[in-house]
Image: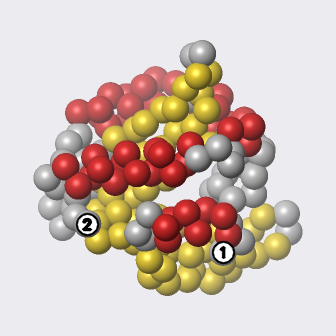
Amino acid sequence: MIAFYNLVGGETDFLSFGKNEFIKDLTDYESFLETTRKEDNSIILLAEIDNKIMGIATINSSSKSRFKHVGEFGIVIAAQYCKLGLGRKIMVNLIIWANANGITKKISLVTSENNYRAMELYKKVGFQVEGTLKNDTYVNGVYGNTIVMGMIL
């Protein structure tokens, strides 16, 4: 998974990290995965074909009582598998899971203001724009804005 994240980080400017910037110690990451597996309000989904990762999607939630009802959504699809409907299928399944887990009441996400395709998909599955974070990214010498979106379940 670490290698996949480092690969896709170089395929797009829409992620929070670039190529080889997903720097994680393997033992620490394995511990994170195990902890996530045990949490009722967090999930990691892998989309694979022939044991090759096509995409990863997550909902990570806090263990703190004031925020455990909010899941932070993230998704990344390898460039060669984009535009095949995979992102939509994964998102729909995560929304179904969130509705059924008995804890999650809201899903939040952030995306680049220039990530038009993703924003259209997010809107189609029920997300709404909640705000804009001004100049909070810096990619290829240019400051950019981040769009905050949310879905109340």
Q: What kind of element bears circle 1?
A: loop
Please name the residue shown 61% across and 32% down the image. 54
- Residue placed furthest toward the right: 141
The disc placed on residue 100 is none
Q: Is 56 positioned to the left or the right of 78 in the image?
A: left
Quarter holding residue 107:
bottom left
Quarter holding residue 48:
top right
Q: Position of residue 64 (x, y in %)?
A: 20, 58
Mark 1–mark 2 CB contact (< 8 Å): no
Q: Nearer the viewer, mark 1 or mark 2?
A: 2
Report the amino acid beneath label 1: Glu
Please name the residue shown 63% across and 56% down the image. 16
Please name the residue shown 74% across and 37% down the image. 80
Front position in the image: 93 or 109:
93
Q: Is 34 positioned to the left or the right of 22 in the image?
A: left
Q: What kind of element bears circle 2?
A: loop
Marks 1/2: CA–CA distance:
24 Å
Could you tell me if residue 22 is visible in this image?
no
Find disc 1 in the rendering and name its residue.
Answer: 113
The disc placed on residue 153 is 2
Check the picture and name the quadrant holding the N terminus. top right
Q: Position of residue 28 (x, y in %)?
A: 44, 30
User: Is the residue 57 above or below the residue 12 in the image?
Assistant: above
Disc 1 residue crowd, few under 14, some 14–19, many 20+, Cα 10 Å: some
Q: Position of residue 127 (x, y in %)?
A: 43, 70
Quarter holding residue 135:
bottom right
